[in-house]
Image (cartoon, rainbow, N blue to C red):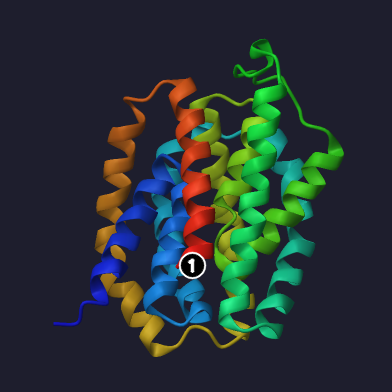
Amino acid sequence: MDWTWVPMVVAALIIGVAKTSFGGLGSVAVALLAFVMPTKESTAAALLLLIVGDIVAVLRYRSNADWGLLRALLPAVVPGLLLGAVFIWAVDDLLLRRSIGVLLVISVLLQLTAKLRAPKSKQVADDNHRPSRVLTIGAGIAAGFTTMAANAAGPVTALYLQLSRVNKLRFLGTSAWFYFIVNLSKTPLTASLGLFTPRVLWSALALLPVVLVGTSIGMLVVRRVDQRSFDLWTLATSAVAAGALIVL
C-alpha cells in the first residue's frame, strides 16, 4: 500500500475544513502535501484543491463579503504574486518551505502582541472599522507573496481581517471572495512555471471529493463557535500552520 496517500487525504480534508471555517488551517495542509511531494509541485496540487474549496466557500458565504476591504486589499496583492513567482523560480524546496514558515511565525507574533496590547473594547467586531492604508498595502503584498510561494496566505489574511475587526460571517465571506479571485489569478503564473505535471493533475482529481467532505465539516463546525472562540481558533491554527511549515 502506498502510505503517501494518507497525508494527502488528510491535507485535502483540512483544506475543505479551512475554506469554510478556520482559514489558518490551510497552511497545515500545504505542509502535509510538501511532506510527501516535492515542495514546488505540492503548491500546484494544493492550488487546485484550494480552488475547489474556494468555489464552495463563495457559494456559501458570498453575501457576507466586505467589498470595501477587498477593493483596498486586492491591488496590493499583484506585486506580491510577482515576487512570489520569482522566489519559487530562484530557490530550492527546503529554503522555500523554511522561509514561508518563518514569515508566518512573525505574522502570528505580531498579531498576538497587538491583541495583548489592545484594550478589550477594541478587540470586538466592528464592521465600520477600516485598517490603515499602510497596513492594507503591507498585508496585500505579504498575502500575494505567501500565497504564490506556498499557498500559505491564510494566516496573513486571517490576521489582517482580525485587525480589521470584522465579525465571523464577514470574515468568512471576505476570505472566500479574496481567495477565489487570487487563486484564479495566480493559476497562469503557476502553469508558466511548469508545475501542473501529470502527477499533480491526477492527484488533485482523486482528492477533489475529500475536499468537498471537508467543506461540509467546516460549515457544521463554524456554526457552533462564537466570535471570541473563532478569533482564538484562527490565531491558534495560524501558529500551528507556521510551525508545521518549519518543522516538516
Question: From the image, which quarter does the N terminus lie in?
Answer: bottom left
Decide: is 158 above or below 40: above
All told, the count of numbered labels is 1
Camera-nearest residue between 225 and 101: 101
Could you tell me residue 108's position as x and y percent?
62, 43
Could you tell me residue 76's position as x and y percent?
78, 53
Q: Would residue 10 be seen by someone viewing this image from the given angle?
A: yes
Q: Secondary structure at mark 1?
A: helix
Q: Label 1, on which residue?
A: 47
Q: Which residue is at a point 68% across and 84% down the rendered structure image? A: 89
Q: Which residue is at a point 49% across and 53% down the rendered structure image? A: 241
Q: Residues within 10 Å of mark 1 (few under 14, many from 20)?
A: many
Q: Is residue 29 left or right of residue 182?
A: left
Could you tell me residue 140's position as x and y percent?
74, 51
Q: Which residue is at a point 57% across and 64% down the rendered structure image? A: 184
Which quarter of the picture shows residue 21? top left
Q: Which residue is at a point 73% across and 78% down the rendered structure image? A: 86
Camera-nearest residue between 177 and 240: 240
Q: Is residue 45 left or right of residue 138?
A: left
Could you tell me residue 199's position as x and y percent?
37, 86
The amino acid marked with disc number 1 is Leu
Question: From the image, which quarter does the C terminus lie in?
Answer: bottom left
